[in-house]
Amino acid sequence: MKKKIMIVDDEVGLRSLLKAIFESDYDIYLCESGKTAIDTIKDENIDIVFLDMRLKDMDGLEILKNIRNINKTVKVIILTAFTDPKKVDRLYELNIEDIVQKPFDIFELKNKVDKIL
């Protein structure tokens, strides 16, 4: 059975790119909003989440807090172009695996995922 990756980003191009890169090895769940991500975490046994920090309906930190209330052990990688030092500390307190700065090297991201899972 394939492991499950949930991609939470409001940029359709990035969601499509990540899906194309990972879909041969993983089941992919695409979410363009925080609400969809939270609903998906409730319904599916997701193994790893790629989470953007700025979505239209919710802040990434708020989404992460909701995810942690539902699933304490799911692996989370933050994908972001913005980093606020106070937020970074809070993200690590919520047990994320890593923060990856956009733009990023897709092969480096794939290697991180392969090591985590």
Image (spheres, grey):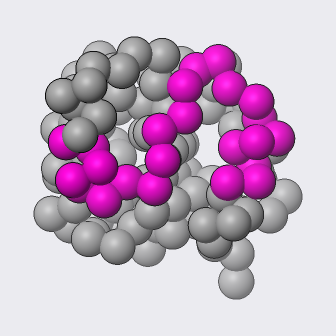
Position in image of residue 31 (x %, y %): 45, 39
In this rendering, the count of numbered labels is: 0
In this orientation, does residue 25 appear? yes
Q: Eyeballing the image, is 98 above or below 74? A: above
Q: Name the foreground residue: 46 vs 85.
A: 85
The N terminus is located in which quarter?
A: bottom right
Identified at 23% across, 55% down, the residue is 94
Q: Does 56 appear above or below 29?
A: above
Whether residue 77 sits left or right of residue 116 in the image: it is left
Q: Position of residue 72 (x, y in %)?
A: 26, 71
* Residue at (51% x, 68% y) in the render: 47
Location of residue 60 (image quadrant): top left
Question: Dividing the picture into quarters, in which one does residue 40 lie?
Answer: bottom left
Residue situated in front as seen by the camera: 102 or 38: 102
Instruction: Look at the image and tell me whether residue 20 can be seen.
Output: no
Q: Residue at x 42, y 30 (%)?
A: 52
Does residue 47 appear left or right of residue 92 in this picture? right
Name the spot of residue 49 as percent of width and height, x first: 47, 52
Bounds of the magenta segment? 90-112
- Relative to the observer, which residue lies in front, 91 or 30? 91
Q: Residue farthest to the bottom?
A: 1
> Image height check: is 35 above or below 1?
above
